[in-house]
Amino acid sequence: MGGAVVLCDVCGAIAKHSCKLCGKRVCDTHYDSKSGFCTSCINGRKLNK
Ligand SMILES: [Zn+2]
Ligand SMILES: [Zn+2]
């Protein structure tokens, strides 16, 4: 029955979000609600473009 806790792929805190780009499960700290991306993707995008 339900209850599998999903942990943030970055820091191990409880993850409430998943990145729209890479699909990582991330916590509030590592998720940007404006873009729907994780911080890793946001940092990567800045580097790429
Ligand atoms: Zn995190
Ligand atoms: Zn991502």
Image (cartoon, grey):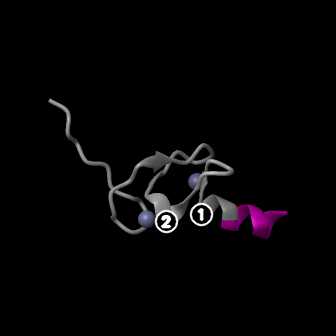
Q: Distance between the residues labelled 2 and 1?
A: 8 Å
Q: Is mark 1 within 8 Å of ligand 2?
A: yes
Q: In which quarter of the image is ligand 2?
A: bottom right
- Write the start and end of the magenta stretch as one range: 43-49
Residue 22, percent across and down? 58, 48
Residue 20, percent across and down? 60, 43
3 lies left or right of 42 = left
Among all residues in the image, which is located at the extreme right? 49
Q: In this view, does 13 lie above or below 2?
A: below
Residue found 41% across the figure and 59% down from its top: 9
Residue bearing the label numbered 1: 39
Residue found 39% across the figure and 69% down from its top: 11
Q: What number is the disc on residue 29?
A: 2
Q: In this view, does 47 lie above or below 18?
A: below
Q: Of helix, strand and loop, which mostly describes the magenta segment?
A: helix
Instruction: Please state the total of marks drawn on the protein image.
Output: 2
Residue found 47% across the figure and 48% down from its top: 17
**Label 2 residue SS:** helix
Residue found 63% across the figure and 46% down from its top: 21
